[in-house]
Image (cartoon, coloured by chain):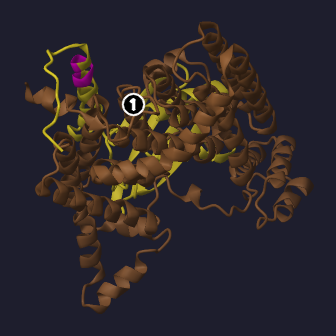
Chain colours: A brown, B yellow
Amino acid sequence: MSAWHRYFDADVPVARLRLFSTVFLLLLAFDACFVMSWRGFAYGEAGFNVAHFAWLDAIQPLPSSASYIGLLLLAGIVAVVMALAGVSRWRAITLCGLFSYGWMQSQLDTYQHHYFISLILFCLIFFPKVDRTVPASRRVAGRGYALLGTTVAVLYFFTAIAKMDAVWLRGDTMRRIDRVHGNLAPLEEFFAGLGVGPDAFWSVLATQVIPLELFMSGAYLFAVATRGHSDSRTRNLCWLALVAAVGLHGGIEFFGLKIGMFSYYMLLLAFVFFLPTRVVVAVAGAVRWPVDALLAAVGSFVSGRAGILGLSGVAAVLLLGVGLAADLPGSFGACGLAAAGVVVAGGLAAGRNRGSKPSDPIFAAGVAAVLLLWGLSLSHVRFEFYGYRGTWLTRSGDVAGGLAAFEKARRYAPPDVLLNEQLQPVRDLPRKDVAPPQKSSERLQQTP
Amino acid sequence: MGEPQASARKFGLIDVVTVAFLVLQIGMTLPYYLGWRGEDERFSWRMFSSVYARDCRVVTVEQRAGKRQRVDLESELPSAWGDALEFARPAVIEALLRWRCRQGDADEVHYVRFCKEADGTIVAPIRSVIDCGNAEIRVDGVLP
């Protein structure tokens, strides 16, 4: 038995795969639909775009707000379907393609963790398809899991290497980043009271991240290699790695050093890889129980060809309705494509009259539609999209278009934002330096 | 728990894909650390880097009949492109210069980036200029 296959092909408890795929895919859907999508306001504007790869620039059409947002919403719907109905190879390939093209198509997307998500989605392609009735403690092929853990180890290794420069080691980078929110100022003052000067404080704070990330890299490789072991050394090291991950990424979030939702993904990975199996089984069970119970209930209620076709019709109508109600460029196209997919899937399932739990993905698509509309109503996506769009159009000289966008932004503005004062100068005497709408969200401040 | 239950396997297609995937990851990242990609930190896992922490500004100037005029980029391009321009990504700079040539009747279009490091040190400016007549681009200063 080669070391390679012992490392990559050792079995892994279903619970770890199930917990990771469910939570990760729901996070991804949230990220794509409600964190990333509003940035589509700039795509293709002024006829200018640069893709991340020259070969893509040569073949792709000019992106647009509609194509970008539509792509992300469709990716979000597919992610929810996979989260609820389970990972299958073709769904994973589809989602990997959709999401990856989403960020590849333009260098407007500067978030490196979107590339990391693409790598994770590629690993999901190698997750085995496991029926939801399979006990969580059962062990299955671990190739996808090993690939995922190794990918995370590579990430941590290079993030540690990346910090080995004089400017970082002096702490200047962290000091400058902290100037935005000042969340680390109380800690700096605390240590100043202990006689630690600001230069030493920032230098130590920055430097300690490097061995921490190198340790995390090794810990992931160790966790993958020992996933069948339960000796005390393995357990202790995994607990240490979990504490380190929570400290590192929890600290990043707490002190406002945000990179989108990167920290949440990393914390999830740490929980999945380093928590003891019995804990993961319990958590996965708690997470999946309501989902599986609902799917089972729907599955028993919807039976036979007529039931499947009826469910497909309902899900498709829901998707189309949400696509219209979402009021974002590309939303109807995305939901329309999803609806078409649901109808085709329902037709195929009904025609074959076989297959494991055919109602699961169809029902999950309907749930995705509901979650999308609910999420849009609670989030600031439409406000931010139309607000930024209004600012851009006004500055570019399209005052009428800018005003129309601002009026839409006002429709979706959070209660604590007053747009009338900002809109009045645009109405009366448009100027190129009119300020963007006041925002209650702080998400826009950080870019990598 | 017992020992890992790995089945006996020969090196197959999935192993080739695994190797290719890992090589691709490392291949996307390593060039930056070997100095082959200048300041282009994409795919390098440099998040919160010293390059990111720089304070930069970009100036774009057009030249017509010997006269130079500054381009108000904020009214010509969405501000979201600011980061890519400040990071001086070669493909973005080239695209900007060619795009600007197509927009009007300029003889030359100049791109200049000024930066200060997080510790206040001045970074050597990066300059690129395109001759709109023959579409040739010259890069002065340090290549990004």
A424 to A80, vertically: above or below: below
Q: Quadrant of residue A145?
A: top left
Q: How many marks?
A: 1
Pick the residue in front: A442 or B115.
A442
Left or right: residue A143 compared with residue A249: left
Residue A47: x %, y % from top left: 65, 28
Kind of residue at badge 1: Leu
Which quarter of the rendered picture does the N terminus of chain A lie within?
top left
Write the start and end of the magenta stretch as one range. Answer: B15-19
For disc 1, the chain is A
Residue A13: x %, y % from top left: 30, 39
Q: Residue furthest top?
A: A351
Task: Give the residue drawn at x 72%, y 62%.
Answer: A438
Left or right: residue B106 compared with residue A202: right
Residue A72: x %, y % from top left: 60, 34
Left or right: residue B67 compared with residue A255: right
Q: Can residue A271 be seen in this snapshot?
A: no
Q: Can residue A238 be seen in this snapshot?
A: yes
Q: Main secondary structure of the magenta part?
A: helix
Q: Residue furthest front?
A: A300
Pick the residue in front: A165 or B107.
A165
